[in-house]
Image: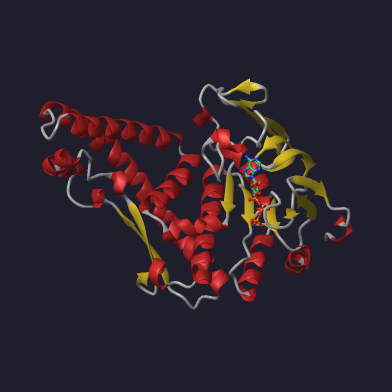
Amino acid sequence: MILHKIFVINYRNIAQADLQFCPGINCFVGDNGAGKTNFLDAIYYLSFCKSFINVIDSQNVRHHSDFFVIQGQYLNGDSVDEIYCGLRQNQKKQFKRNKKEYPKLSDHIGLIPLVMISPADEMLIMEGSEWRRRFLDSVISQYDKGYLDTLIRYSRVLAQRNQILKDADGNPPADMLDVYDGQLAMWGAMIYEKRKAFINELLPVFNHHFSNISGGAEVIDIHYRSHLSGEDFELQLFASRQRDAQSGYTHRGIHRDDLEFTLGGHPLKKEGSQGQKKTFAIALRLAQFDFLTRHQGVKPLLLLDDIFDKLDSLRSKRLLELVGEDHFSQIFVSHTNRDHLEAILSGIGKEVLFFDVANGEIKLDNQNHHAS
Ligand SMILES: Nc1ncnc2c1ncn2[C@@H]1O[C@H](COP(=O)(O)OP(=O)(O)OP(=O)(O)O)[C@@H](O)[C@H]1O
């Protein structure tokens, strides 16, 4: 799968861009605040129907404009797909494949597999458990349509259960809780099994990537923590009813799942250096890449936003060697320094194309003869 062309109008600070890419490595170089991440975000948008940076769509429209358009042409063997996204302020977003509007946006998820590695991945390690659940959900739903549907059903019932807990003033009707608990137990068990299977399959690949980039000296691990790994979930919901009624909130369930990351047996969040945390997050994303490739039979697009910051030169080199392998397909990289990027990419056996980014304007660099 290759993004061959993109056309962008009024997306964040990008007034207009009309670009064609190479199937190898496409590099976007510019100063801080130039619009590199915004541009990668536009590519991300076409895969996930939403921004990576800001989920409030109205704020992604360029200041003083009232609409944005992102349009991409994708090639996959002989097939061509045109994906269109248009948003006008205060109107419903339009998302089309080959001029045909999707009945629901979730139908599009997974069609253009994509993995983004960005500084925001640090949140996976440093922030609350919702970030790690979001990671699980976004990867699994890219290859498993039923997962997203089950998750939506679970969340709907959970919201209903929480609402009656809040409304009932400490005394919710038991017959309604019986119904909700039965449904939560059913959808919850399905989600738990899929998350568990995903982590089990991800772990060895993740370990492999981590030791490749780090040189193999550090021992890291991931543990999936869920209330559902213990006692019967419906019994837990039942036992927790009084406490739930007092707080107006459901305390047990897959909405509290978490991933525990460790380094040498200790919490990575507390013990890891900045470079170790970054390496961990990158290995996780690369494992996600392998996972999607295996499950979808298509290599995802890989977006590397400001990826070399905080990595020592050896780790940067190992990472680039890895990324330069045929294992990966088309890659989009952002960086502030062209000479540095060119030095890291030298010797890579892939076509490389440079683009200059300044004040939201993106142009093909006229020195592209340096590309290998
Ligand atoms: N809706 C918007 N309209 C206009 N400009 C916006 C909008 N949203 C964000 N911006 C501008 O985009 C700029 C940030 O762009 P971006 O994050 O892409 O920079 P970058 O090139 O990735 O920088 P860095 O190297 O620091 O990561 C900021 O100046 C911000 O004001």
Q: Is residue 3 above or below residue 326?
A: above
x, y (%) of residue 124?
Answer: 45, 56
| Residue 49 appears in the picture as rendered | no
Is residue 36 left or right of 273 when viewed as pictured?
Answer: right
- As rendered, which of 247 and 282 lies closer to the eye? 247
Is residue 367 left or right of 166 when viewed as pictured?
Answer: right
Q: Residue at x 46, y 56 (%)?
A: 123
Is residue 186 left or right of 96 when viewed as pictured?
Answer: left
Residue at the bottom extreme of this rendering: 217
- As rendered, which of 300 and 130 lies closer to the eye? 130
Find residue 178 and report its image quarter.
Answer: top left
Residue at the front extreme of this rendering: 64
Q: Residue at x 53, y 66 (%)?
A: 279
x, y (%) of residue 97?
Answer: 64, 27
* Image quarter hosting the N terminus: top right
Q: Is residue 223 above or below residue 239?
A: below
x, y (%) of residue 252?
Answer: 22, 45
Q: Is residue 121 above or below residue 15?
A: below
| Residue 328 appears in the picture as rendered | yes
Q: How many marks?
A: 0
* Image quarter hosting the C terminus: bottom right
- As rendered, which of 331 and 250 lies closer to the eye? 250
Is residue 177 left or right of 36 when viewed as pictured?
Answer: left
Q: Residue at x 46, y 75 (%)?
A: 218
x, y (%) of residue 15?
Answer: 73, 38
Display colour scheme: secondary structure
